[in-house]
DNA sequence: GGATCGTCATATCAATTGCAACCGGAAGGC
DNA sequence: GCCTTCCGGTTGCAATTGATATGACGATCC
């Protein structure tokens, strides 16, 4: 167990990063979005307006990252930011038509790449991965409830 | 499938990151090592001298990252860097006594934290995770052999 | 042997990130 | 009403990272 390759957390991180790199190659290299921008666009394109609070809760991004990523998305005309009417400290983020169009262009490609990879796995292993990952996420949450 | 939480690559990345954060909390917050520094120390403390080529091959770090991380480790007195005798372009990295001592202090704590988390998983799920992760790593390697 | 090409380490510069201060705005006490 | 405290978002600055260029070295071909 003194070899890094066999050290589980490292294998997990390396695999996740490799997967992620593959997808960044789709939405980043071709469309110039960073990972954070893609995540935000993903959440916003689902439908209606979302507050910044929702965003940082539903991503692993902190408020500075949300602020800067959304600024760039706004500069690109993909989203708009308004001040929330009930609490003027909050922002309401909304995807523009251009943003939704871009999202609808990219999503199938990302899904296709994802499918390419996942369907290359032997039968049953994907289910095993799902099972294991869910259990791990739960375990991490239980062990370290403090988080950020 | 329009929810980020259910989007598999995201779940994988988020879980890996959460796990990693937990470990960084051990070697980083308490001993001031970055993830890269910890990885290098890990590899070097195993035993004898290692060339920079080995290092970047056995981590996901490129040579610039190796160069920088090892510089910091040298500044802290944890490793030494010599010029390789057979190829004077290469560097030979060796862990100092201080480096090994620090590693021997940290490793048990990292392993303990890892065990805390993994053993909180229900019976069988860890094996499933191993299986799935290996299959996924293979699939990624097959799909995108170019990599870096 | 000398020219040329590929490779490794490092330097340099721009872009990104993290941290902490700051600026409104809200909430609660008085 | 005000004043204090807390909270969300932004901004500035320092440290880090990434991309690219430079310089040193080794290997190959002539």
Image (tube, coloured by chain):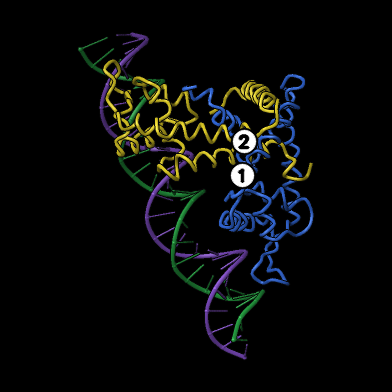
Chain colours: A blue, B yellow, C green, D purple
Chain that bears disc 2: A
Report the number of numbered marks. Answer: 2
At a point 51% along the width and 38% down the height, the residue shown is B23
Q: Within 10 Å of the Cα at label 1, are there few (<14), some (14-19), or many (20+) other Cα atoms?
A: some
Q: Position of residue B77 (x, y in %)?
A: 29, 36
Chain that bears disc 1: A
Confirm or deny contact between disc 2 and disc 1 (CB under 8 A).
Answer: yes
Residue linked to disc 2:
A20
- Indicate the secondary structure of the residue bearing disc 1: helix
Dots 2 and 1 on the same chain:
yes
* Quarter assignment of residue B76: top left
Residue A73 marker: none
* Quarter assignment of residue D2: bottom right
- Indicate the secondary structure of the residue bearing disc 2: helix
At a point 40% along the width and 42% down the height, the residue shown is B31
Residue A35 marker: 1
Q: Within 10 Å of the Cα at label 2, are there few (<14), some (14-19), or many (20+) other Cα atoms?
A: some
At a point 76% along the width and 27% down the height, the residue shown is A127
* Quarter assignment of residue B50: top left
Mark 2–mark 1 Cα distance, whole angstroms, equals: 9 Å
Picture layout, residue A146 above or below residue B72: below
Picture layout, residue A138 above or below residue A37: above
**Side (left or right) of A129 relative to D6:** right
Judge by depth and name the residue closer to the eye, A120 or A76. Answer: A120
Q: Position of residue D13 (x, y in %)?
A: 39, 60
Q: Position of residue B110 (x, y in %)?
A: 49, 34
Q: Position of residue B39 (x, y in %)?
A: 45, 31
Judge by depth and name the residue closer to the eye, B24 or B4. Answer: B24
**Side (left or right) of B82 relative to A103:** left
First of labels 2, 1 by sequence position: 2
């Amino acid at each position: 167990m003194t070899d890094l390759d066999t050290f589980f957390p490292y294998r997990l991180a390396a695999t996740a990063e490799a997967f992620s790199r593959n997808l960044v190659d789709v939405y980043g290299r071709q469309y110039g979005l960073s990972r954070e921008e893609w995540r935000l666009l993903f959440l916003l394109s689902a439908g209606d307006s979302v507050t910044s609070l929702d965003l940082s809760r539903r991503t692993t991004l902190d408020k500075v990252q949300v602020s800067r990523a959304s600024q760039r998305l706004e500069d690109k005309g993909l989203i708009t930011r308004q001040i929330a009417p009930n609490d003027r400290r909050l922002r309401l983020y909304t995807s523009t038509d251009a943003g939704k169009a871009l999202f609808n262009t990219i999503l199938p490609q990302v899904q296709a790449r994802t499918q390419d990879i996942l369907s290359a796995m032997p039968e049953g292993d994907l289910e095993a991965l799902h099972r294991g990952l869910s259990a791990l996420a739960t375990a991490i949450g239980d062990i370290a409830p403090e988080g950020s």
